[in-house]
Amino acid sequence: MAADIFASRILVLGCGNALAGDDAVGPRVIDLLDGNPDLPSGVVLLNAGTTIQELLLDMAVADSRPERLIIVDATLAPDRQPGDCWEVDLASTPSGLATDLHAFPALTELGMLKSALGVDVRVVAVQAQHIPAAPAEGLSPAVALALPNAVELVLSLCRE
């Protein structure tokens, strides 16, 4: 399966834990995109759950890679309101960050895919209201309302 998804023109990964409140936003966006008539051909959707690190490493050593990788995930940015949805500018993200995508630095891996391997990496962030430490299903109202905006942002990146 990995070879098939990495050979796609565009790969969209929805990251997050369905049992961790707003962290489920990435998989929920994938659910909403699945079967969407506006999704261009050549786009593969994958609910990556919490396996983003492994997938990025597999992609780095794969024989083929997508032209564009779009990652959708929740974040807890200090300067954003719950439900905000935006594309992260990977070029202006501080270096030296850990590899937690909620702070957007699996950026070490993403930067490598973008520069060394020629994959156009885009990250769609949705500001979480709360990511609980203990299992808790369900998005906050603000994040649930942001789902259509996140879907539209992903669709626009797929059409570029």
Image: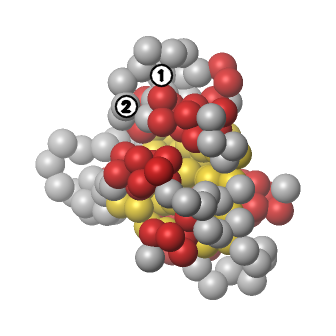
For the point 41% across and 61% down, the residue is: 48
Q: Looking at this view, is 79 or 18 the one in front?
A: 18
Side of 102 relative to 125 (left or right)? left
Amino acid on which disc 1 is placed? Pro
Measuring 49% from the left and 47% from the top, which residue is drawn there? 60
Amino acid on which disc 2 is placed: Thr
**Relative image position of residue 160 (x, y in whole percent):** 85, 56
List the single residue furthest toward the left. Answer: 134
Name the secondary structure under disc 2. loop
Q: Which residue is mark 2?
A: 99
Image disc number at residue 78 = 1
Asked if the residue at tag 1 contacts the one at tag 2, i.e. Cβ–Cβ closer than 8 Å, the answer is: no
Report the front residue among 33 and 98.
98
Judge from the rendering whether residue 69 lies leftward or rightward of residue 128; answer left or right: right
Q: Position of residue 98 (x, y in %)?
A: 36, 24
Q: Nearer the viewer, residue 70 or 152?
A: 70
Q: Hey, which quadrant is residue 123 in on the image? A: top right
**Rendered position, 47 above or below 59:** below
Label total for image: 2
Instruction: Please name the residue shown 54% across and 45% down the image.
Output: 126
Q: Which residue is at 62% across, 35% downward? A: 116
Q: Determine crowd level at label 2: few under 14, some 14-19, many 20+ residues with C-alpha closer than 10 A.
A: some
Which corner quadrant of the image does residue 12 belong to? bottom right
Closer-to-camera residue (19/3): 3
Residue 152 x, y percent position in the rendering:
72, 61
* Residue 134 appears anywhere in the view: yes
Figure colour scheme: secondary structure
Nearer to us: label 2 or label 1: 2
